[in-house]
Amino acid sequence: MSSSPLQHHNDKDAPESVHQSTIGDANEPVLETRSGKSVDNPSTDHHAQEPADTPASSSLKPRWWENKSLEEKPTDGIYGWAVVVSGCLMLMFSMGCVNSYGAYQTYYHLNQFPNEPVSTLAWIGTLQFAAMSLFGIVAGVMCERLDTRLVSFSGGLIMGLSLVIASFCDGAVWKLILTQGIVFSIGAALVFIPAMSVPTQWFTNRRALAMGVVVAGSGIGGLWLTPATQGMIDSLGTRWALRITGIITFAVVSVSSLFMRNRLHVPAREKIIDFTLLRDIRFIYLFVGLICGVTGYFTPFFLLPSFAIQKMGKSESFGNNLITIINAASIIGRIGTGQLAPVLGGINTMAGCTCIASLSILILWLPFESTGTVIASAIVYGLFCGGIISLLPVVLANLWGVQRISTIIGLLYIANFMGGMIGAPSSGAIVDNIGHGTNFKPAITFSG
């Protein structure tokens, strides 16, 4: 398969011991070493190396929470896999809660708020992802300037508190939008960005596989959180479902955050946010592609249960099981795409996953209302939709390196915010206005 023009840096990972910072000032080409010292860029005029006791060199000394010895540890090691497991658990509850919101939306629509339009209820789940993406740029800056363990711990605390507070605010939709939607998303961003950026620093040869395992956490979370949430709602109601989920989320994320340590020392910059990437055509391609991909990404998660209940006459449990099937398939898909990326290339694999996921909606879901085709659509969509998310850090690390990856991910996730704000609310509005609450085909076409 031919390689994408974005991928001329994708063939081999840059050595971790000496890495060029490509986001800083173009007039200051500095190479970072693991010890935090700088050497000259070989592509520029050769100057004498700066003595270790000069102010410029001393400014690169690790800050008080950074352990210099970590930079000397080899990549692809045992501690790296501990970071991967921790990142997997963190995404299990940050993205897993987002993926399982369909269980809440189905209950809200059929029981708690039957007079509210679907598009209004969809704003809760939409803001969980969209606001998390928007706040990601702030989370990325915090990861560069603060201890990433403290950042992720704070995120877990905010996530847990937001769900507990939401349990006391279930009398009005706007209160749930504020707590379960916006406040939760702020905490999720503080968890999501470290989980997506720190593991890339600990791997070189197996980076794609490692990130596939990390991102599989969101599928694992959706796999068991969806039926668990449905079971808690049926037995205890939404109030205790939110409280129990919030407590467990804080407990797991707080422990996992202890391992989220940066391996590489990143010197603080004067610019809080560097927008020079906006002039890079490769970044622009990725930005536009993410907007398009994310616009339709969450529609199957939110509408498949309602489609199964209203159009196919299935039970609520069957509708929620479709979300479980998507999440289960995505676990396999995210790890599998991590194996394909080194062979086909990260950009090519991401593009292929996006196309197949789209076709699974348009070919298997749109024309049919039978049980077999809808289940097949859920399986195929789950296998390939995760590649859009899991391969993004790998592509970014190969193109721009790992030292500034947290801020790059945060900046790029503005595209996720834009796609999320367009996607699910538009699908809900299409169902309400064009489909008159019963015809899902226009929304399915829009998603595909």
Image (cartoon, rainbow, N blue to C red):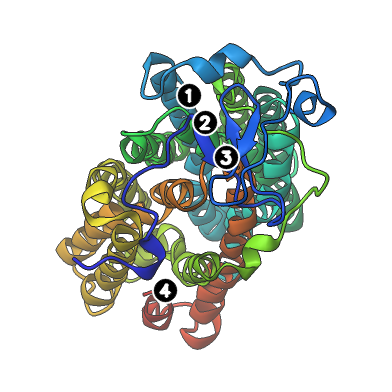
Seen at 67% across and 43% down, the residue is: 140
Q: Name which residue lies at 51% across and 59% down.
A: 110
Is the C-beta separation of discs 2 and 3 under 8 Å?
A: yes
SS label for mark 4: helix
x and y, in percent, of residue 147 in the image: 70, 25
Q: Tag 1: residue type?
A: Ser
Q: Which residue is mark 4?
A: 447
Label placed on residue 192: 3
Drawn side of residue 334 relative to residue 101, left or right: left
Disc marking residue 203: none
Residue 416 showing in the rendered view: yes
Q: Tell me how far mark 4 sits from mark 2, CA to CA.
A: 28 Å
The Cα atoms of the two marked residues, 2 and 1, are separated by 6 Å
Query: Does residue 135 appear to the left or right of 201 in the view shown?
Result: right
Where does the C terminus fall, quadrant-wise?
bottom left
Helix, strand or loop under label 3? helix
Which amino acid does the dot numbered 3 rest on? Answer: Phe
- The residue carrying pointer 1 sits among few (fewer than 14), some (14 to 19) or many (20 or more) residues within 10 Å by Cα, namely many
Along the polypeptide, which appears first: circle 3 or circle 4? Answer: 3
> Cα distance, mark 1 to mark 4?
32 Å
Q: Nearer the viewer, mark 4 or mark 2?
A: 2
Could you tell me residue 233's position as x and y percent?
51, 38
Q: Residue 284, how many percent across, how many down?
A: 55, 70
Distance in Å between CA atoms under marks 3 and 4:
25 Å
Q: Residue at x 60, y 51 (%)?
A: 44
Of circles 3 and 4, which is in front? 3
Q: CA distance from mark 2 to mark 3?
A: 7 Å
**SS category of the residue bearing label 1:** helix
**Residue annotated with mark 1:** 86
Q: Are marks 1 and 3 in contact (CB under 8 Å)?
A: no
Asked if disc 3 and disc 4 are in contact, CB closer than 8 Å, the reply is no
